[in-house]
Amino acid sequence: ASGGPAGGGTAGAMAGMERLLDFGNPMDVPLLEQVVQTLQTTADQNLRNQANKVLTALKEHDSAWQTAGTVLEQSNDHATRFFALTVLEDAIKFRWKALPNEQREGIRNYVVKKLIDITSNDDYTREASKRTFVNKLNLILVQILKQEWPHNWPNFIPEIVDSSTKSEVLCENNMNVLRLLSEEVFDYSKEEMISDKVKMLKEQFNSEFRRIFDLCQLVLNSSQRPSLVIVTLRTLLRFLAWIPLGYIFETDLVNQLLTKFLPNTTFRNDTLACLTEIAGLKEAKYDMIFQNMFITVMRILSQQLPLETDIPAEYDRAMEREQDFIRGLSLFFVSFFSQHLDILEQPENHSGAVQGMMYLVSISMVDDKEIFKICLEFWSKFAKELYDSDRLGGGGRTSLLNLGSNPGNFARKNIYASVLQRVRNVMISRMAKPEEVLVVEDDDGSIVRETTKDTDAIAQYKTMRDTLVYLTHLDPQNTEEIMLTKLTQQNSLTLDVFNWNDLNTLCWAIGSISGAMTVSDEKRFLVIVIRDLLQLCERKRGKDNKAVVASNIMYVVGQYPRFLEQHWRFLKTVVHKLFEFMHELHPGVQDMACDTFLKISQKCRRQFVFLHPTETQPFIEELLGTILNTTRDLSPHQRLTFYEAVGHMVKEQENEAVRNKLLAALMQPASTQWRQLMEQGSSSPQALTELTNIQRLADILRTNVRVCSSMGYTFRPQLQAIYLDMLHVYKFYGEQISQQVRESGPAIVQHKHIKVMRVVKVEILRLIETFVQDAQNNEDIANNFCPVLIEPVLLDYERGEPITRQPEVLQLFTAIVNKLRTDSNLAMDGKFVHQMLGPLFNPTLELITKDFVENPEHRVNFYKLLGALARYSFEQLFSVPPETQKSVMDSIVWAFKHPDRTNSELGLEILERVLQNVANAPDTFAQPFYSKYYLSLVQDILYVLTDRLHKSSFTMHTTILQMLFTAVAQGRVKEPLNPSCADNRAFLVQTVSTTISEAFPNVSRADADGFVAGMLEPKDPAQFKTHVRDFLVRLREFSGDQDLDQLYSKEREEERLRKQQQLLQERAAVPGMLTQQEKDEMADL
């Protein structure tokens, strides 16, 4: 009974909200307050959605900003006033240049007056809502300054400084404004403003900084208002990174910070932050100031936090402010040591350097992730520098940490011997968990299998591993001594110190230094370690204890392939121990045993296939004879890992006949089952439709795939034996699935039988793809494997029901084209590409052109196939009827317009390749292509260039735009783009400028013409990119796109890759530093 009135009330409320969008009448401030409150507080989802819709429409209206003043003056509701400020801020950001001068000046004056009115007395500092309101006003003022200063507001700096001297309360907020302005100009400007504007603002700030600095000095010298001093220190902190050094070192600033503010706990944290920023500067003529600064900090620190203090315990007991101080100390020491160790390594300063580092070692033990990351980053660089210094004997070089280069440099590590010993202890006791370790302790203290990867821990492990490798090189004896002492304690019968965490970190540390010792030292060390761990495993009782020890044994042995490869008896013992662990049912142990076995098989595979002295047969033969017993307790995925590992061993046998015999023995259980199933299917095809048999086929094929993945092309005899039967199974299941779909509808594909049949088809495709990718004979693939694929695979794809088409088919043929490369044009007497395209092209378009969401795997794989064909078979790809050629180009456009980044980047890569081929093609092909597609491609690329969903591909957009515009500028487009205009250059400027002006009405025609004409001028790629980027930043003032950061993503990625490759080369020179993955990357390079 109550439903009617409530519903009517809701409808009435919704209708009432719409009155806010009637700009013909004055703003109804009470109604606006009601709508804002509705959005924030109502439980009625319909009302909330309507309120959000109305407020969004109001905010986006061109005239909405004109109501902001009324709302701010009449409303007492904080949320409503904040909404009005947001509307005003958006107008300043995105519509400022479209406003008349008097309106701009009116907004500016209003904001300044409002700020002065509120911040001229202390009241606003006592209420959180008022402070939030003032902070928003400050941000709005900074947005105005970015538009108006200095050209339309040349007196801003004198005005804000003068007003600050008249009122400490006002001065406090003015400092916040200056800090925000500094951040906008020097920290965030790259993504916000065009490069010329940034340069101008920086120059203006520098030229007027004397006034600001004098104001800061006035506050620091005279103010008795603690909050003002704190704000001034925080503002000064933002200035220190860019102001001329004379302001810092040729004034009393440093002394003032050290003597007046650092000893005072009220200002200590902010002062330390300023000193940290100063410590990060480097100028030789100020070395004495840096030295005195460090000495003074150490003196004050010895009073506030004596070196003998248990800093980790103190941190745990401390309040937040004291914890921030310890965090600040870590940043200060890291900053100072990174820049000025050359000063501290003068003989008179050695004790101070060691004392400071001892502080940092103690801080490194604090139980705080962020603090440890700060310390770890320094210890990693410091250890590397000492290693380089020790290895080079102190020769002159450029140093990451500005370490000393005196004649006694070769002995520098001796200065820090006591420090390095403690750092080794820190690294060993806090070593992060490596990725390979799967047995972990959960929150309840139980030992379980890890279910998710801790990416932070993996990254931290890599840094800690590098650090410990360097530290080991500096003193391998000390590292060994620390590790063996800790291991003895864990293994002691008298000391009750066995602890999962301590044993884990110790073993992870032991595994991390593989290769860092000499061969003889490593042998002696490992013999003790493995012996003690095996004893510990035998001695410990309880499933959890045994699982922890087993996990550590497997991790350690997996990290030392060099030792195992050279010591067969140890290797054999370890492998038999792994086989024991494969029968251990504790969670994670079997997985780790199989993973470790795989790793050892990859690294030591040769040892398993030849006959060792005192042995009667190669180990591989013994293994194959007991393989069923060894794997009986393994789950299916573990068994696959085991078979993959054995495949690596078999591949290593160089004698082809012996290798084929071993392969047959390895695959014998699977092959026997396969023959039995084929015989059943031959006599009664329906036997292959029984669920149990389908599942058996899937398991057999998975085993083949994994062994093929490790054996590569040497797997050929096994694949050849089952190839034709496999394709018959593929065709049979394809027909079965399509028939079921036709009879029962698409929902049948979710039936268990059908799903497992599809799995079989996928595994067949995956097996062929795995084999092709590692094939070593293109002619063999083209003549013996490709022709028989056409009927069972391609015709099944073409004729089968759409829902049954496997995306892996596209993936397989992409792999074939990428393997054959240009040979694909000759395969099957030159017919391969066309015979492949026919069944794949239109059936796939049928799946992916309905919308942008359905069939994502088909979409990605289709574009990858197009990309491969554009690279290796361009002529055949485009030697198709005109309507098919148009479909190809349409597909490429759909790809780069797709909202998913993977698809859009694939489309752009294909288009780039197509345009390169067209540029090199004869005019008989190129000119018709340009006539058909040139203008539409330009418009489509401009569309994605200005669309926020595709910003991440900015670099590719500019590359393709430059290719298109250069083609016209250099006269390569010879046919008129428009029959009524013979001058393609003039026509292009006119057409594109018109398109831009229509899409962005507030962009003047002159600006659009200038942008297009600039793209036709000769430029290198970097200049062209800057030209386009500056235009997009200018467009930002008229659009709601607030994040242009991704316009720089390509530069950042290129710089990251360059540094990564450089770092890889440096790491390769350090024994034991490269992981197996990095060794593989080096091989690829």
Image (cartoon, rainbow, N blue to C red):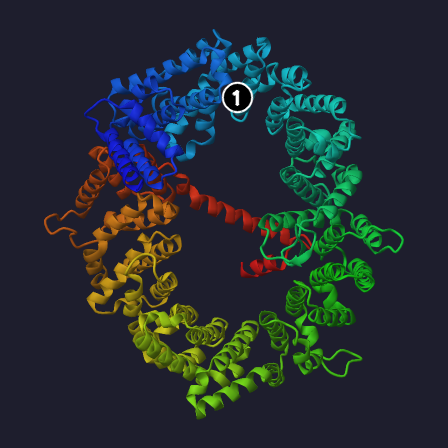
In the rendering, at what x and y percent does residue 941 appear? 28, 49
Q: Is residue 1042 visible?
A: yes
Quadrant of residue 559 in the image? Answer: bottom right
Image vertical order of residue 530 relative to residue 1038, above or below: below
Quadrant of residue 594 in the image? Answer: bottom right
Q: Is residue 675 left or right of residue 893?
A: right
User: Along the line of sight, which residue is nearer the eye, 913 or 785?
Assistant: 785
Image vertical order of residue 935 relative to residue 816, above or below: above
Quadrant of residue 254 in the image? Answer: top right
Residue wearing tag 1:
235
Image vertical order of residue 617 relative to residue 189, above or below: below
Q: Is residue 406 visible?
A: no
In the rendering, at what x and y percent does residue 83 appear? 36, 27
The amino acid marked with disc number 1 is: Thr
> Where's the N terminus, which quadrant?
top left
> Where's the C terminus, which quadrant?
bottom right
